[in-house]
Amino acid sequence: MDEQALQDTTPIFQRIKDYLVAQIAAGTWKEGDVIPSEQALVKQFGVSRMTVNRAVRELTADQVLTRRQGSGTYVAQQKYQATLLEIKSIADEIRARGHAHRSSLHQLERVKASELMAKQFELPAGHLLFHSVIVHFENGVPIQVEDRWANPLCAPDYMEQDYAAITPNEYLMKSAPLQGASYSIEALAAPRDIAEMLAIDTKQACLVLKRQTRSNGQVASIATMWHPGHRYQFAGSFAQ
């Protein structure tokens, strides 16, 4: 089915929702910006006020937009959460919030480990490693760039996975049962390539989670996960 045919089968209220989310993701409207009025959207799309109202109402329920009585509709503060006490698939985190997850694979390659990377994996220099770069989206908004290195000794089929249907985390949890993990979090300015993938300005700070996982006495993977600081937060709790 071509793009035009697909568009013809998409309900118009959904097309309006997709348009609004795309404008936010592209940075046309930022947090706190007022979006066009419902009347303006009625004219733009040539539809009824009821159809536009449904699109705006559903995005408000999803906390993408926020309405202020007598003032208008604004882009809501987007603070997506990730737990630190459990290692979960980002897809599961997003679905648990009732939101839609999708991913875009930007890179998948076999690489000979540099001395530094080999040392981190406790392997000899030149050892084969698998490398992937994936962007994860929540309700159409990019919220994470996952830059992951995987040990073929723990994840032999890493290169054969369909990462539109499964996340690297989901595959690794099956192929390399978690034995332990270490992580660090820091705030860093986004490099240009990361900023482009997250649809943010290079001056914006990112929350960067670096995590190493172990399985069967070996380092299974090392991942660096970039999150837009204004859209994301980490949370966790524990009880004795």
Image (tube, grey):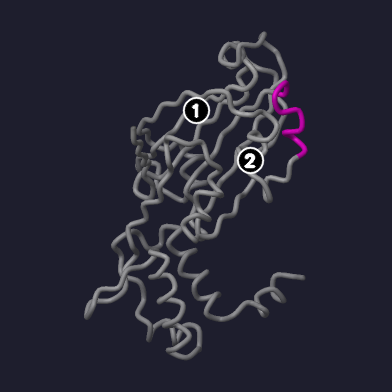
Q: Residues within 10 Å of mark 1 (few under 14, many from 20)?
A: some
Q: Relative to 229, is 178 on the left or the right?
A: right
Q: Relative to 133, is 143 on the left or the right?
A: left
Residue shown at the point (41%, 76%) measured from the top left: 56
Of residues 40 and 167, the one nearer the viewer is: 167
Q: Look at the image and give the residue range highlighted in magenta.
A: 152-160
Q: Earlier in the sequence, mark 1 or mark 2?
A: 2
Q: Element type at marker 2? A: helix
- Quadrant of the image containing the C terminus: top left
- Residue 25 is covered by the magenta coloring: no
Give the label on residue 103, or none.
none
Tag 2: residue type? Glu
The location of residue 46, given as percent across then percent down, is 50, 88
Q: Quadrant of residue 130?
A: top right
Tag 1: residue type? Arg
Prevailing secondary structure of the magenta residues: loop
The location of residue 212, given as percent across then percent down, is 53, 24
Q: On screen, 64 above or below 36?
A: above
- Quadrant of the image containing the N terminus: bottom right
Residue that lies at the very extreme toward the bottom in this rendered image:
48
Residue that lies at the very extreme toward the front in this rendered image:
240
The location of residue 135, given as percent across then percent down, is 56, 46
The location of residue 94, given as percent across then percent down, is 50, 53
Residue on which disc 2 sits: 170
Residue on which disc 1 sits: 211
Q: Element type at marker 1? A: strand
Of residues 18 and 212, the one nearer the viewer is: 212
Tag nearer the camera, 1 or 2: 2
Q: On screen, 61 above or below 197?
A: below
Of residues 124 and 45, the one nearer the viewer is: 124
- Residue 159 is covered by the magenta coloring: yes
Q: CA distance from mark 1 to mark 2?
A: 15 Å
